[in-house]
Amino acid sequence: MSTDSQPTSASSPAFEFKSGVITIPVLNLFSTDINAITHQLREKIKQAPEFFTNSSLLLDLSAIQDQELNLALLIDAIRNSGMRPIGVRGGTVNQHQAAKDLMLPIMSAPNSTSKVKQEVPLKVEILAQAPSEPLTSVTVTSTIINQPIRSGQRIYVKGDLIVIAQVSAGAEIMAEGNIHIYGTLRGRALAGVQGNESAQIFCSDLQAELISVAGNYRISEDLDESNRNTPVQIYLDNQALIIKNI
């Protein structure tokens, strides 16, 4: 019996490209001290190993552009800590060349035009194309989930997300808009995942592993005891993540 594989038909696609959205932790570097970075990174990973271990990581070099950095040594240290660097943003031409030598892509800096359009495309495009015309009204869709979200499940919606049940430990819910949870939040909730800093999280019972608004996050160990097991409102104020009892 022949075991030769059949050739793929020229008319049959072997693959397709699809756009997707994933959440990636960003490491904003304020020091080039590899030992200090390694020690603090490992301590942070210990606080939430299920979130950080084997996670992709984007390095932001914007704050250390005037300092010498051994990028190869830093990448080795990060990998040995259990995380997987996938690229850099910000930094100098020399730092970018070092990243390319390590086969790491260069991402758009957060203050670049392309980054702003990616995070708030609707607002930027309307103002740029027709600044003298009335803004187009936009309907934000809401997704309602009535069933508990079990451990291991990941939910992503483009608008607001309303959960009329609990979010179990090990589950992750993400929304480009607001998140409302009318049950206990034990897993991870990430609102404004495309950079919407006006997004908020409303939760009836906060016991979360991680909460995040527009990339600003806080893990369970960093939550104030006064906010636990109570209804809360979570939002950004001058880049600070505020958790307010309601």
Image (cartoon, rainbow, N blue to C red):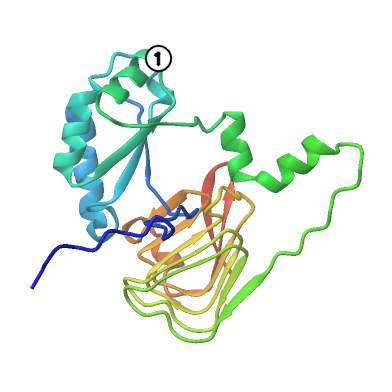
Image quadrant where one finds the N terminus: bottom left
Q: Total of numbered circles in the picture?
A: 1
Residue 131, position as x, y percentages in the image: 86, 36
Q: Amino acid at mark 1?
A: Val
Q: Which corner quadrant of the image does residue 26 belong to?
A: top left
Closest to the observer, 15 or 67: 15
What residue do we see at 25% from left, 44% from top?
Answer: 84
Decide: is 12 above or below 163: above
Does residue 33 appear anywhere in the picture? no
Q: Residues within 10 Å of mark 1 (few under 14, many from 20)?
A: few
Q: Which corner quadrant of the image does residue 103 belong to?
A: top left
Q: Which residue is mark 1?
A: 93
Decide: is 97 above or below 153: above
Residue 195, position as x, y percentages in the image: 56, 47
Q: Find the residue positioned furthest to the left.
A: 1
What residue do we see at 24% from left, 63% from top?
Answer: 6
Taking the image as shown, residue 61 lies to the left or right of residue 42, namely right
What residue do we see at 48% from left, 74% from top?
Answer: 230
Decide: is 134 above or below 130: below
Q: Find the residue positioned furthest to the front.
A: 1
